[in-house]
Amino acid sequence: MSAQGDPSGFRTGLRGLTTRGRSFLAAGVAAVLCSYLLGQEALLRVGVLLAALPLAAALLLLRTRYRVASGRRLTPHRAQAGQEARVHLRVDNISRVPTGLLMLEDKVPYVLGPRPRFVLDRVEPRGFREVSYRVRSDLRGRYPLGPLQLRLTDAFGMCELTRSFSAADTLTVVPQVQALPEVRLAGEWAGYGDSMARSVALAGDDDAVPREYRHGDDLRRVHWKSTAKYGELMVRREEQPQRARATVLLDAREIGHRGSGPASSFEWAVSCAASVGNHLLERGYQTRLLTDNGTQVPAPNAVGAGGSVSESIGLLLDSLAVVQHSQGSGLARAEEVLRLGGEGLLVAILGSLDDEQVANLGRLRRRAGAAVAFVLDTGTWAGLRRVFPDAGDHESDRQLRLLREAGWTVLAARAGDSVAELWRMADRHAQSAGDGSPVHKGASA
């Protein structure tokens, strides 16, 4: 992007006069008037000089013919909440004359901090200057950076003109992601494999389905039974490794969460979904994010949904960076999506539930190869159980018991709990050493 120092119109220069320039101009006009009233020629010369200085500075600034280009670079483009990102600015003088004093101001949202300002001295022809500043946000989201504003001033500080570049960038602040340990879940298999005897959790591409013959196919792969059935030459598909599927269900209902801001139960749930989704994608799972209103990421049949692991992680985190509360009262839409295609590993991050929702989740468990539920004790985020943190809620305990009886691996989460520690408790070997019901530890309500 570029800005040119040749604005049209002398009025623009007059509007750009600084307080100093206006004071000089006013003093010069006053001195000229007094010279006529008092008949003092010396005072007239002083007044003309005082008035001519700011006007000459404005005219000189208007007639400046240098061109300035600017670029911006973010490191990183995608930052976690609470993590600093650095913005690098570069200003190039692409004209043949040196610049004067330049003042830069980049426009940033208030949640990222104050607007950064820089003063650059003379930039030689074809030269450049680089500056940088840091931004940080505890709130996830997408924040625009720019456009960059350039202020031109003369050597005496009499006149100042502002020019804005057109380009802007976007900083994406994603939820905090915790590294999760490797665990083996009840009914779960690894992300990749080639065994046809695996459970329905894999649900990979069907390698036994033949396809039509194409020029160049090996005739030894002709599937004669299908050829006789369809009346045209059919060949067997090439064997491909199956890929396990996983669904991360995020309960975003506003009525299902408590607290506000970064310390709310909803933000903990979003961070949990990001951590689990990132972990499963790194293990080779074909992972999708599903919210309570039925939204899926990546969308069904989306172009590029089968990209690299890094691209899939980026898509997941970008979606979680902007996810907001839903106004729904139940999980019906998400349950419908899972009924149509809920095979594989199911990890649900749930807020407050009622008995009907617990019963529906119990029925959905039958379609999944493995099912893990993070059930948030949202009252601890609202500070309702600080006096007696070990006092059990009989209604919540009953719901957790029903989910376990339906086959879910239930992890009860409280404010301050670590996602990694809860995930470790889901290990089937750790559960087999006990009664199969993970015991909550380390709650800091």
Image (cartoon, rainbow, N blue to C red):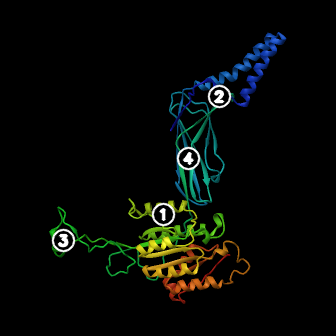
Disc 2 from disc 1: Cα separation: 50 Å
- The residue nearer to you, when weighing 3 against 331, is 331
The secondary structure type at the circle numbered 4 is strand
Disc 1 from disc 3: Cα separation: 41 Å
Q: Mark yes or no: residue 312 visible.
A: yes
Q: Residue at label 1?
A: 316
Question: Badge 2 local density, few (<14 within 10 Å), some, or many (20+)?
Answer: some
Q: Earlier in the sequence, mark 3 or mark 2?
A: 2
The secondary structure type at the circle numbered 3 is helix
Q: Mark yes or no: residue 341 visible.
A: no
Q: Nearer the viewer, mark 1 or mark 3?
A: 3
Q: Residue at x 73, y 23 (%)?
A: 25
- The residue nearer to you, when weighing 445 against 288, is 288
User: Horizontal and vertical percent for residue 59?
Assistant: 62, 23
Q: Earlier in the sequence, mark 4 or mark 1?
A: 4
User: Horizontal and vertical percent for residue 23?
Assistant: 75, 26
Disc 3 from disc 2: Cα separation: 84 Å
Q: Residue at label 2?
A: 154
Q: Is residue 33 above or below residue 105?
A: above
The secondary structure type at the circle numbered 2 is loop
The amino acid sitting under disc 1 is: Leu
Q: Which label is found at residue 88?
A: 4
Q: Nearer the viewer, mark 2 or mark 1?
A: 1
The amino acid sitting under disc 3 is: Tyr
Q: Nearer the viewer, mark 4 or mark 1?
A: 1
